[in-house]
Amino acid sequence: ADIERFEARMAELSPPEQVQERFKDEVQKLQVLEQGSPEYGVTRNYLDWLTQVPWGIHSEDHFDLAEARRILDRDHDGLDDVKSRIIEFLAEGTFKGEVSGSILLLVGPPGVGKTSIGRSVADALGRDFYRFSVGGMRDEAEIKGHRRTYIGAMPGKFVQALKDTGVSNPVIMLDEIDKIGASYQGDPASALLETLDPEQNREFLDHYLDVRMDLSKVLFVCTANQLDTIPRPLLDRMDVIRLSGYIAEEKVAIAKHHLLPRLLKRAGLKKKQLNITDAALKQVIDGYAREAGVRNLEKHLHKIIRKGIVKLLEGPDTPIKVGVADLATYLGQPIFRKEKSLKGTGVVTGLAWTAMGGATLSIEASRIHSSQRGFKLTGQLGDVMRESAEIAYSYVSSNLKRFKGDQTFFDKSFVHLHVPEGATPKDGPSAGVTMATALLSIARKEAPQHNIAMTGELTLTGQVLPVGGIREKVIAARRQRISNLILPEANRGDYEELPDYLKEGLSVNFAKHYNDVFQVCF
Ligand code: ATP
Ligand code: MG
C-alpha cells in the first residue's frame, strides 16, 4: 500500500532522472524488506519525503507592476523609498522574465514592517510564502539535513519549505540572518551561503535526501536588525533595502489604517463601537510607544481594546470613546514624560544608532571632587566609545583657553562622565562631540543650549568626522520633538538626500571642526 501511494505521488511530478532512479532503487529495497523492521521504517520515511518534494512544479509569476504597487500600498503606509526599491526590483524581474538569482535583505529595527513587506512581495508575484528564523541556528543540519543514518534524521529547512508550499519556486524568508550562530556542528553560515548562492544552489544537496535539487528558482528574502554581524561573503551577494523606523505622524497613519482596523476585526468589534480620538492616538504614541517600530504601539492598542470590551460588556450598551483623559485608566501612567527637554550644566543630548533603530541619548558630566585630577566613565560603554570619551577629555582639557573655560578646571577636578540607560550596551565613535560638549559645559560652568541634539566623531585635533545612521538619528530626534541638530559636515549629503517630510521644520548645523559645535552650543 505504501508503495502504491508513493508511485501515485511520483506520477504527478516531473522529477529529474537522478531522482527517478533513486526512487526506483528505494522502492525495490522496500519490497524486499520485512514490514515492521526498523529498516523498513527508515526507507518508508525516506520515500515519503522524496515524493513530497514538488519536483518540477512551479507557480507562474505575475509581473504586473501596477498591481504590485497596489498591493504594497494596500498593506503599508509610508515606506515610499522601500516600495520604490521593491518596484524597481520587480521591474528588473519583468524585464528578465524571472526574479531568481537575487537575494533581498530587509534591514531595520524590530517592528518596522520587514516581514510584512516580504509577504507583500510574495503576494505581488503570486508566489507562496514560507518563513523561518535562522537566529541562533547552531547546527548545519537544520539547513542541510541530517544524514539518513542518524536516528530520527530529517531533511533541512529548505526541503521542508518546498514540501509545505508545494512549489519549487516559493518566496522563502530567512529571519534574523544577523543572529546566525557560529557553532560546534559545522558552520551554518557557510551552509547558508552555499544555499543562497545562485551559482551553487542549482545543485543543492540536502544530506537527508541525498539527491541534487534545484533551488535556483526560489526567491530568498532575508531580514536583519543590523548589518555588522552578517558574514561578509553573504552580505556581498544581497540587495540591501533599509527600513529605518517611523516618526510619530507615520505611526498615527499606520495605527488608523492598519493596526486598529485589524485589532478591532480580530476582537469582533465594529468600528463604531470603539473609537479612539486622534489626540488620544497621538498621546499613546508619544507617551507609551516611542520606539522605531510599531509593535509596541500595536500592543498598547490591543490593551485598550481588551479593556474596552470589558466596559462594553459590563456597562450600558453605548459606544466607547477613548480620549486623552481616559488613557491613564486604560494604560496606566505614561512611560515617557512630556518634552522634558534636558537642560542643565553638563547635560547634552546625543544621537545614537543601534540595532533597535535611532535613539536620543543624554550624556551627563559632573565634577565629583576637587582633591585630585582624573576621570571615570559609566554606562556599559564598548571599547570604541571609551576611547572617544578619552579623546573628548584630552581635547577639551587641552583647549580650554580657546573655549573660554576655567583653564585650571581639569587640574583640580575628578570628573564623572555617564551615558544613561546603563543596561543597554553601546558602542561606536559617534558620541565624541556630545561628550566633549558635556565636559566643556562643566568647565565653563554653563549649560549648553538646550533642545539641540548632536552626533559626530571627534579627533584629538578637534576635527569632526562623519558617522552612520543619519536617517535613523534624524527620525529619533523628531520622535523626541528636538528640532535643532548638529551633524558632521561630511554627512551633509546624507542629510540632504532625506525626504522632505523628515527635514521639514528642522534646523541643522553642519560641523567640520569642534569650533563649529561650540559656536552653536554656547
Ligand atoms: P521584527 O524585526 O521584529 O521581525 P518586522 O520588521 O518584521 O519586525 P513586522 O512584523 O513586519 O515587523 O511588522 C510589525 C507589525 O506592524 C505588523 O503587524 C505589520 O503589519 C505592521 N506594520 C509595520 N509597518 C507598517 C506599515 N508601514 N504599514 C502598515 N503596517 C505596518
Ligand atoms: Mg519580522
Image (cartoon, rainbow, N blue to C red):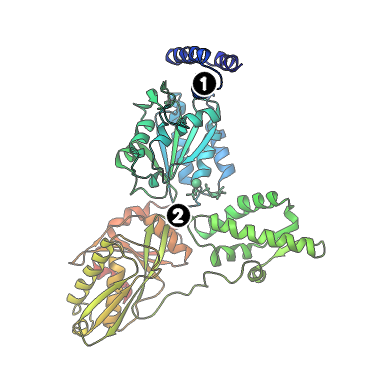
The residue closer to the viewer here, 49 or 121, is 49
Residue 279 found in image quarter: bottom right
**Secondary structure category for the residue under label 2:** helix
Residue 297 at x, y = what percent?
A: 57, 58
Q: Which residue is depicted at the point 68% across and 59% down? A: 306
Residue 238 at x, y = what percent?
A: 37, 38
Q: Is residue 282 left or right of residue 480?
A: right
Residue 485 at x, y = what percent?
A: 37, 65
Instruction: Check the image and name the residue furthest to the bottom.
Output: 371
Q: Earlier along the polypeptide chain: callout 2 or callout 1?
A: 1
Q: Is residue 269 left or right of residue 491?
A: right
Neighbor class of circle 2 (other Cα within 10 Å; few <14, some 14-19, many 20+) is few
Q: Which residue is depicted at the point 55% across and 46% down? A: 76
Q: Is residue 359 above or below residue 436?
A: above
Q: Is residue 346 left or right of residue 2?
A: left
Amino acid type, residue under disc 2 in the picture: Asp
Q: Please name the residue that numbered disc 1 is placed on.
A: 40
Figure disc tally: 2
Q: How far apart are the alpha carbons under marks 2 and 1?
A: 67 Å
Q: Please name the residue that numbered disc 2 is placed on.
A: 500
Q: Which residue is depicted at the point 44% across and 24% down? A: 209
Quadrant in the picture for the C terminus: bottom left
In the picture, the disc for residue 64 is none
Neighbor class of circle 1 (other Cα within 10 Å; few <14, some 14-19, many 20+) is some
Amino acid type, residue under disc 1 in the picture: Tyr
Residue 502 at x, y = what percent?
A: 45, 57
